[in-house]
Image (spheres, rainbow, N blue to C red):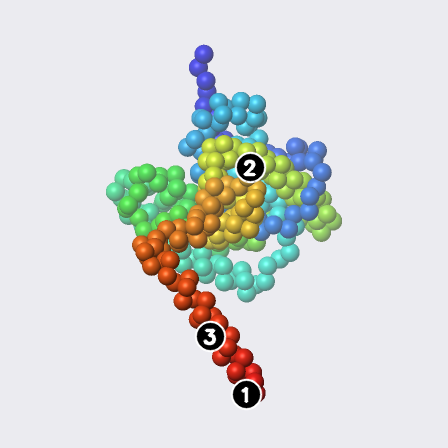
Amino acid sequence: MKNTSPSLPSLLVDLAALDAFRDAAAHCAPTTCRADLPVVVANVNAAFRAVAPRLAEVPALLPKLDLAPVLEMPNLAQGLLYAGNRVASAASTKEVSRQIEKARRVREPMLVVAEGLAMMGLLPAERVAKIRAGTGSYDTARDVVDLVGLYREHAGAVANKCPFDEPWLTEAEAVGAWLLANLTPSGAAKAPSSDVDAAALLRDQLWTMLLERDVKLRIVASVLFEGRAESVVPALQSRVSGAAAEATSEKGAEPSKGPEDASGEAKPAAPAQPASEPVVAKPAAPGASTPPAPMRPKSAEVRERRAVARRKR
């Protein structure tokens, strides 16, 4: 019997992503969402870039786990982002302008390099041309997100041929996602104020769904990556730049937690250093028997000098 390998569903964005989970969300109890949703989307995407190449291993390792809801997390995160955009308080004009300028600065070099790679046959020319064709602030944000997706999709073909590493792409994606969450496309209708409560409820229900599925994602990560799970698969709300450092410091503060101590097995390296110091001092062992003798009179002399000093006062 031939086993079919699990695979990620096609990526959905904006309203399509929201509609895909609207009915299921209606049955969830809401959990108030105060997360930075563009960061959540970036972390979910990073997690699945790590997990996707090893999906075929999961059914054998976790035969009772229903993997389908887990694989929908990237689309669910996109739907949550769109839902959050409908209820989020408006960002300041100054902040929007700053982010638009940042998006323009990253869009142009990414696009110019993409055009060169397309001329070399390494990227699809029609997709690059379509990205170039649009105008406007919202389109700029969409272009940045699309370009990041294009580079990742063809990572093998453009490896060592473009200057954009993964941290750079992640930061660019966060800028684009923030703008998509805070800008309204030309001609799009805004939700009436009477619908704000319903929109917030839907956002919070989607957040509940994502939290529930993230629990299963953690299980998958722990089985696939064992002690490296927390560094390979970022937590939903962790900042990309500091996630690894935070995970390490948290584990260092709790060395007694065995089962969930992902980096705890490496943590014994801390006690190992003090243990290794006597070994380093071992070559001085021939004289090790003599230092204790002079040390006692020396400490007595110190005490005597201190006593004399006190009497003089």
Q: CA distance from mark 3 to mark 2?
A: 53 Å
* Of pointers 1 and 2, the one earlier in the residue sequence: 2
Q: Residue at x 60, y 39 (%)?
A: 210
Q: Residue at x 39, y 63 (%)?
A: 291
Q: Which mark is residue 312?
A: 1
* Of pointers 3 and 2, the one earlier in the residue sequence: 2
- Residue 243 in view (yes/no): no
Q: Which mark is residue 301?
A: 3
How far across and how far down the image is residue 28, in percent? 69, 36
Question: Which element carries disc 1, helix, strand or loop?
Answer: helix
Q: Amino acid at mark 1?
A: Lys
Q: Which residue is mark 2?
A: 259
Q: CA distance from mark 1 to mark 3?
A: 17 Å
Q: Amino acid at mark 3?
A: Glu
Q: Quadrant of the C terminus?
A: bottom right
How far across and how far down the image is residue 169, in percent? 41, 49
Q: Amino acid at mark 2?
A: Pro
